[in-house]
Amino acid sequence: MRVGIIGGGNISETHARAAREIEGLRVEAIYGSNAERTGSLAAEMAAVAYDDLDRFLDHGLDFVIIGSPSGRHAEQGIAAARRGLHVLVEKPIDITTGRVDALLGETRSAGVRLGVCFQDRLHPEINATKAMVDAGGLGRPVMASGHVKWYRPPEYYSTSKWRGTYRLDGGGALMNQAIHTVDLLLWMFGNDRRVSGATATRLHAIEVEDTAAAVLEFESGALGLIEATTSVYPGYPRRLELTGTEGTIVIEHDRVTRTDLKSGASGPDGGGAGDTNASASSARVADTRAHQRIIRDFVNAIQTGAGPVCDGADGRRSVALVEAIYASARSGQPVEITQGGA
């Protein structure tokens, strides 16, 4: 199969290197606005570099992987779908549910697959935890909390044209850094029906929030908490805590670090926590392996007709929740969440 990469930044390098290692998959073309970076990545992949999206989409591809700034995902995905190409999108699927719904409608009309890069779902220990929750191993859901307390230095934003902007980032610590954790909370415990949130910009000179907190009310009756920040020095491992009537599981980064069940049964315990900020060079190797899993899953969806581990409709849920948190922060009132869509 022939894949094209949209975007020439760090995540597109991860996409391309992950795809290159998958047997039967060839990186054919790369499109990006930065000619130097796009050309360098294309040379590394022995692919063709493009600075024109239409010419790129006419190259002769089976699917594209989109790793451009978040606010461009839907428009580029729609353009690919109209060429009959399957679309795998980096998180978040886009920055508003309106744009997401437009992408869902176009891919549905074109009869192409749409997937979202929530690769954490395929990490063995996280996947095993999901199976345990679904099988009732934790009992009835009681509480779920996600803590993403990271640190980003000022230059993380100042050297980027899109990070920390409403137009292309869509938000800050919640929409960008914490979106994986938001997805896992919803994946594990189901839809949220109401949320109360607060946001602030405490450290960085950016348009959007670098600090946020929210209280969730799940449809199941369980409660939840989200903390998201890029302003906590020096940064700590992402932490996910899931509690049901039969016990608790704790995940740090992508490892199960504690399982406490009334039955005394063991859970999918693993080693220590992962990288505290998910940005060190040692984490890039792990990112490549994780993206190999999500790309393989998407290729399998194309070939077999099965759904990808996170399709477009499922990817919409995290954007809807973050949108609701932002709305609550603006109004100072709880916000009801609808899970509609095209």
Image: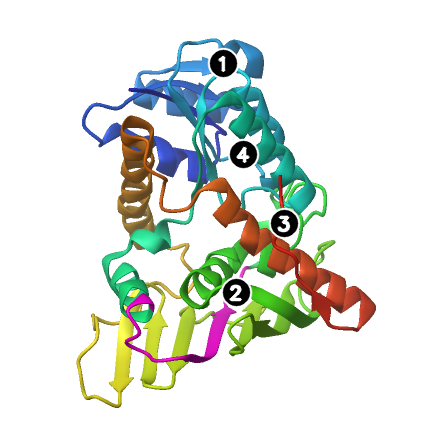
> Mark 2, mark 3: which one is toward the viewer?
3
Q: Which residue is mark 3?
A: 340
Of badges 2 and 1, nearer the viewer stands 1
Nearer to us: label 2 or label 4: 4
Whether the magenta-drawn stretch holds residue 139 is answered as yes
Secondary structure found at label 4: loop
Segment colored magenta: 134-152
The label on residue 68 is: 4
Chain-order first, disc 3 or disc 4? 4
Residue 88, image x, y percentages: 43, 34
In this view, the residue in front, 265 or 207, is: 265
Which numbered marker is on residue 230? none
158 up-or-down from 64: above or below: below
Q: Which residue is mark 2?
A: 151
Q: Secondary structure at mark 1?
A: helix
Residue beneath disc 1: 56
Along the viewing direction, whichever of 177 and 261 lies nearer the viewer: 261
Image location of residue 21, percent across then percent down = 22, 32
Name the N-terminal-most of marks 2 and 1: 1
Q: Amino acid at mark 3?
A: Gly
SS type, badge 3:
loop
Q: Amino acid at mark 4?
A: Ser
Judged from this view, the residue extending furthest toward the right is 331
Task: Report if the CB atoms under discs 2 and 4 are less than 8 Å apart.
Answer: no
Instruction: Say whether residue 18 is visible.
Output: no
Quadrant holding the C terminus = top right
